[in-house]
Amino acid sequence: MTENYSTETVGIDFCPFCERVSLTLPKLSHLDKQTQICSLCSHIESMLEFKYLFNGNSRKILEERLNRINSDMYKIENIDSHKFRYLTMIKSLMRVNLKNFKA
């Protein structure tokens, strides 16, 4: 006898950040603290925040990183995706950092 497993009973889901199948989505996104994402994407979000928000020691570096985010966002086809919204948030925070930067 074969059993029919649906995605709800097995716990298979899609991570909205990487859009890959995941057996568990144990972490909350930094974007809204509600969207569940896979562990790897949670780590990626943390590293992106560190790289783009907290690890800039010159205005030129911050501007280069902002340009990099713009080019990364240009490559994303689905503007409603979680990844696009997350990068939009990082970009907004970087603009505030640039505005407040004293060099």
Image (cartoon, helix red, strand yellow):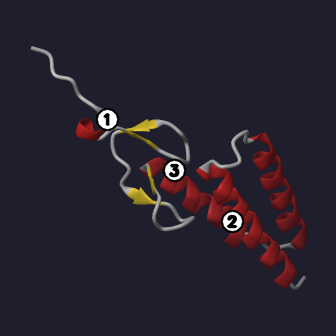
Q: Amino acid at mark 3?
A: Cys
The quadrant in which residue 14 appears is top left
Q: Residues within 10 Å of mark 1 (few under 14, many from 20)?
A: few
Relative depth, front residue between 101 and 103: 101
What residue does disc 1 label?
7
**Residue beneath the point at 38% across and 50% down:** 25
Q: CA distance from mark 3 to mark 1?
A: 21 Å
**Residue beneath the point at 53% across and 65% down:** 30
Q: Amino acid at mark 1?
A: Thr
Residue that protrudes farthest toward the left in the picture = 1
Relative depth, front residue between 19 and 56: 19
In the picture, the disc for residue 89 is 2
Q: CA distance from mark 1 to mark 2?
A: 31 Å
In the picture, the disc for residue 41 is 3
Q: Residues within 10 Å of mark 3 (few under 14, many from 20)?
A: many
Q: Quadrant of the N terminus?
A: top left
The earlier-in-sequence mark between 3 and 2 is 3
Across and down, in percent, residue 54 comes to 68, 72
The earlier-in-sequence mark between 1 and 2 is 1
